[in-house]
Image (cartoon, rainbow, N blue to C red):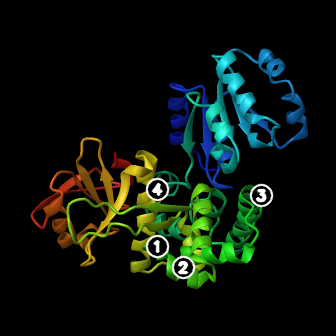
Amino acid sequence: MIQRPGWVRRIRDAWQTRPVVWLSGVRRVGKTTLSHLLPGARYLNCDLPSVQRTLEDPELFFDSAPRDAVLAFDEVHRLPDPGLVLKMAADEYPGLRVLATGSAKLAATREFRESLAGRKLEVHLCPVPWEECMDAFGIAELDRRLLNGGLPEALLAERPDEGFFSEWLDSFYARDILELFNIRSRRGFLGLLRVLLRGSGGQVDYTSLASGSELSRVTVKAHMEAMEAAHVIRLLRPFHGGGKQEIVSRPRCYSFDTGLVAFERGWREVRDDDREILWAHLVLDALLMRFHRDRVLYWQDKSRREIDFVIRRADGTVDAVACEVNPERLDAASLQAFRRIYPDGTNYVVTPLDREPCRIRRGGLPVTVCSTRHLG
């Protein structure tokens, strides 16, 4: 089992401001395991009829719990009225700390959001990030993390298991998409998802996606909204505002997991160019762990000069993030073009190497070379 102390700290920090923490994430990403890792927590699997009976009278249940109890409600959407249970815990039992996991559909419903407004914070659990993988396996295991992906069961396997990824896709459709979003066309939905996995990291062209998946543009957009709500894709908007030649409308689409990308592309080993593509996914994970998703964008102009990721800061400055396994491969021309328009901000080159940040100069610009654990 992979220990995840950073996520335990995130949950504890969230409890400092809200009594209820909503732990989100795709299936088999480790939400249940993390629930068991909380020191002193009472774990309740709401899938079980015995737990559902126990919570039929939530007031009676909470009255019998210690005033400072830590409670983990796993699959809370299986309860008849999960919003009421969590709202009661937050309002009537102020000493309790509650962790809840459940379906994306429940979290998105208006009634659920309103009932817990001001009472909960969301912590999104992503696949095992690179810094945790380094701590568990060491830097030499970069290719293992890229090919196996970050779902704990797949990551701990000796080699990528095609059966695991095939079963995961089938289960994702049956349990998340069909059940939660009522999308009936399995072939069309999974066909589109596979097209997106093969092109992960690239710009979205809805016409090409419709052609490649044999779906209409309207259906493609609707399916992608469901995928984004279910956390299997991340759409990054282009950053723009000062240059007439900038890309302004086409988002980039990234898979949530490198293992699925490698599986769909048929990669059994990693070539240098493949490694760069997959490494960008791990850097994006690190950024989304630290910044709100609306602050993480990308930049490209019509001459195809690009910055992998742009961080929009609250003070109006913008940081440029380049993802390079070998920092010597930094494209200084793209950075120079970006900084001619947006001069204020820090330049980063993020590498897998676990070393203290250092500063270099490329194209006349100062650049901080660092690992994902030093982003902030």
Amino acid carrying mark 1 in the image: Val
State how far apart marks 1 and 3 are (Cα).
27 Å
Q: Residue visible at 50% across and 41% down? A: 6
- As drawn, is 193 to the left or to the right of 237? right
- As drawn, is 53 to the left or to the right of 273? right
Q: Residue visible at 57% across and 78% down? A: 195
Q: Earlier in the sequence, mark 3 or mark 4?
A: 3
Q: Nearer the viewer, mark 1 or mark 4?
A: 1
Q: Residue visible at 28% across and 50% down? A: 356
- Residue 98 image-quadrant placement: top right
For label 2, count other residues whose C-alpha is less than 10 Å away and answer few (under 14), some (14-19) or many (20+). Answer: many
Placement of 177 over or under 165, stated as above or below: above
Tag 3 residue: 179
State how far apart marks 3 and 2 are (Cα).
24 Å
Tag 1 residue: 204
> Measured from the top left, where is residue 290 in percent x and y?
41, 45
For label 4, count other residues whose C-alpha is less than 10 Å away and answer few (under 14), some (14-19) or many (20+). Answer: some
For label 3, count other residues whose C-alpha is less than 10 Å away and answer few (under 14), some (14-19) or many (20+). Answer: some
Q: How many marks?
A: 4
Q: Is residue 269 visible?
A: no
Tag 4 residue: 285
Q: In the image shown, does 115 or 23 lie closer to the viewer?
A: 115
Tell me, yes or no, whether the two marked residues, 2 and 1, touch with CB atoms within 8 Å: yes
Q: In the image shown, does 353 or 365 lie closer to the viewer?
A: 365
